[in-house]
Image: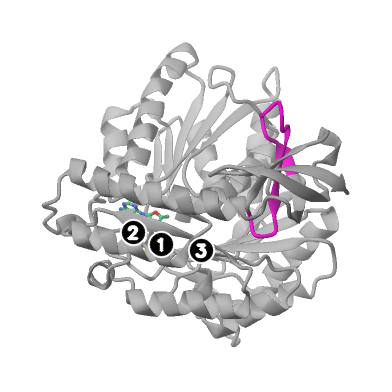
Amino acid sequence: MDRTQVILPAGAVRRQEAYTGRLAALYRRKDRPPLAMVDTYGCQQNVADSQRIMGMLRDMGCGFTQDPYAADIIVINTCAIRENAEKKVFGVVGQLVHVKERNPEVVICLCGCMAQQETVADRIRKSYRHVDLVFGPQALWRFPELLYGVCTEGKRVFSIADEHGSIAEGLPVVRESGVKAWVSIMYGCNNFCSYCIVPYVRGRERSREAADILNEVRGLVEEGYKEITLLGQNVNSYGKDLDVPMDFADLLREIDRIPGNYLIRFMTSHPKDAGEKLFAAMAECPHVARQLHLPVQSGSSRVLKAMNRGYTREQYLEKVDMARRAMPDIVLTSDIIIGFPGETEAEAMETVSLIEQVRYDALFTFIYSPRPGTPAAKLPDPASRAEKQIWFDKLLDVQNRISAELHRGYVGKTVRVLVDGESGDEAWPLSSRTAGGRLVHLRGDAGLIGQYAEAKIVDSNTWALFGEIFSV
Ligand code: 5AD
Ligand code: SF4
């Protein structure tokens, strides 16, 4: 892809700022500042996108609310990865009809991965007439212009053209905490795993220039952020489209040179592209967390081939060994899909045996959900939902046992944690994470949020560790 077509000229982004200014002027004429509600579903990339949308809304003069009845603008940022996620959003959007009845002036916007699908947009067009604006992830940077169109022309606006995707630098942002920040390093996906909708809704892979990423991370560190997570559908493809030779391992090393007291995490890594060079960079960079989210999806080489994953069970296990040779203490997590079309019980049990072999610290597990338009959705799928549920429950039992065993191994040890918020648990009111990303509930007061602490682990369960702070 031609970089000059991918990176939006600064003028294009500035034109959006002009629309933001016009909207701010419109809102200033009202009797009070507008309130916006942003409701986010799905992955961290969506969270990061919502923070940009909130940045644009803030620059229009908006305050924020969680109450749809109090809002002047409602933005629902959606996820299309599984059918359940879509159903939930249709439920939420359906309910908003009552909000529109009570307040016909409210502007209701639907964005994100669901919105990029033609079938969803059609359904919204016909059956959810109270939705005013629909735009996909690829049009996010044009939100001010689209919203201005709705506000001044009184028409519904749909912007879901299938573009290859672009990169907009310099969009405003509202970050949720002063401790953790998300930084997108690339957008889109070229892998076309046969079950996955992402490449169809988020466009082709495109990497941000390293200088832009470094500037953003440096700024965050200077502002005092302690944990920065680099985001991409497949961070290991970073740099393939850049004019200068630069890959993800090189980028990690560059970022690591930024002085300060902070930790770098990243997600997600595709096993076919992760290797010695990445693991060496992780091992040698003190700011990089020794944590690797390496989705395997299945433990059966036959199913992996049908999923178009580009590796076999054996090749995956070799990558895990390679990572552990470089970093014996690495915390490993993964994504698993059970019940891919045509998967047999024996194949599902190969996945169970793989997790026994790897002993992940934690897993994100899903039952396959057909996504219209993907190749897998056309495959015969003879196993029943009930059978798949049995395989899924078996997998969870095994993983829960492994997580509990690994967590028990921490008891009595002292770990360095970053206190990142309140846990909601009265006995252990603070929530924190180890460098490997394990959740630790702590006793202590809220003044510690945003600080590193040494904690002695005194108890554990399947989901978390419990610790006493003994020095800050
Ligand atoms: N059904 C179930 N799970 C899916 N994922 C992606 N597509 C599907 C689907 N159609 C899972 C994969 C991916 C994670 C983000 O979501 O495990 O890694
Ligand atoms: Fe989907 Fe595969 Fe791309 Fe991940 S790598 S977003 S699972 S197509």
Q: Nearer the viewer, mark 3 or mark 2?
A: 2
Residue 15 image position (x, y, % from top left):
62, 54
Q: Nearer the viewer, residue 221 or 344?
A: 344
Q: Amino acid at mark 3?
A: Thr
Contact (Cβ within 8 Å) of mark 3 with mark 2: no
Please, is residue 98 above or below residue 124 in the view?
above
Which residue is under mark 3?
268
Query: Crowding at label 2, few (<14), some or many (≥20) Cα neighbours within 10 Å?
Result: many
Which residue is under mark 1?
356
Residue 298 image position (x, y, % from top left):
32, 63
Distance from disc 2 to disc 1, alpha carbons, whole Å, reads 6 Å
**Residue 203 appears in the rendering:** no
Say whether mark 2 is within 8 Å of ligand 1.
Answer: no
| 237 displayed left or right of 438 | left
Residue 339 image position (x, y, % from top left):
24, 53
Q: Which residues are magenta?
A: 420-437
Q: Amino acid at mark 1?
A: Glu
